Image: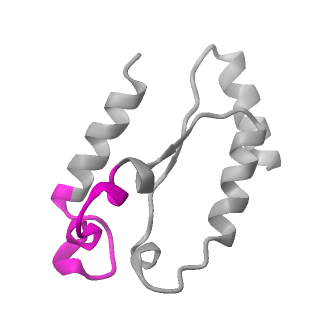
Amino acid sequence: KRILQLVKKLVNENNSKLYFVYLPEYSHFKKNYDDTKYNLVKNIINELGIPFIDMYEEVFKKEENPLKLFPFELNGHYNIEGYNKVAKKIYQLTKN
């Protein structure tokens, strides 16, 4: 929390805009996902008034099969389609 407070202060001093972008990991889409840390971080971000961009809500939740945004639907980084959708959504939400 302290680091985010310092980052927010630095951003404000430089007349910039800060966004926190949540990128869901593979395990988010498996059964019994523990969202305790996710909720903790989201609450801190909201408490500090930092815009929270949730790629789970904005992109992955809207997919019939969100695992298709991972290579071969396996654990790891996103595939080309996944990164493309995430990048387009971030641009759309931050372009103003």
The relative height of residue 63 versus residue 14 in the rendered view (above or below) is below
Task: Answer left or right for 74 relative to 7.
Answer: left
| Residue 49 x %, y % | 71, 32
Q: Is residue 57 above or below residue 49?
A: below
Q: Tell me if residue 71 is in the magenta stretch.
A: yes
Query: What residue is drawn where x is 33% and y is 31%?
Result: 91
Q: How many marks?
A: 0
Measured from the top left, where is residue 79 in percent x and y? Answer: 21, 64
Is residue 95 shown in magenta? Answer: no
Residue located 37% across and 37% down the image: 90
- Residue 82, by quadrant, is bottom left
**From this viewpoint, which residue is outermost toward the right?**
2
Above/below status of 82 relative to 54 = below
Left or right: where 33 falls relative to 68: right
Residue 78, by quadrant, is: bottom left
Colour scheme of the rendered structure: one colour
Residue 10 % position (x, y) = 71, 27
Which residues lie in the magenta part? Answer: 59-81
- Residue in the image at 37% along x and 21% along y: 95
Quadrant of the drawing holding the C terminus: top left
Residue furthest to the bottom in view is 32
77 over 6 or under it: above or below: below
Percent across and percent down for residue 70 are 25, 71
Locate residue 43 relative to residue 71 in the image: left or right: right
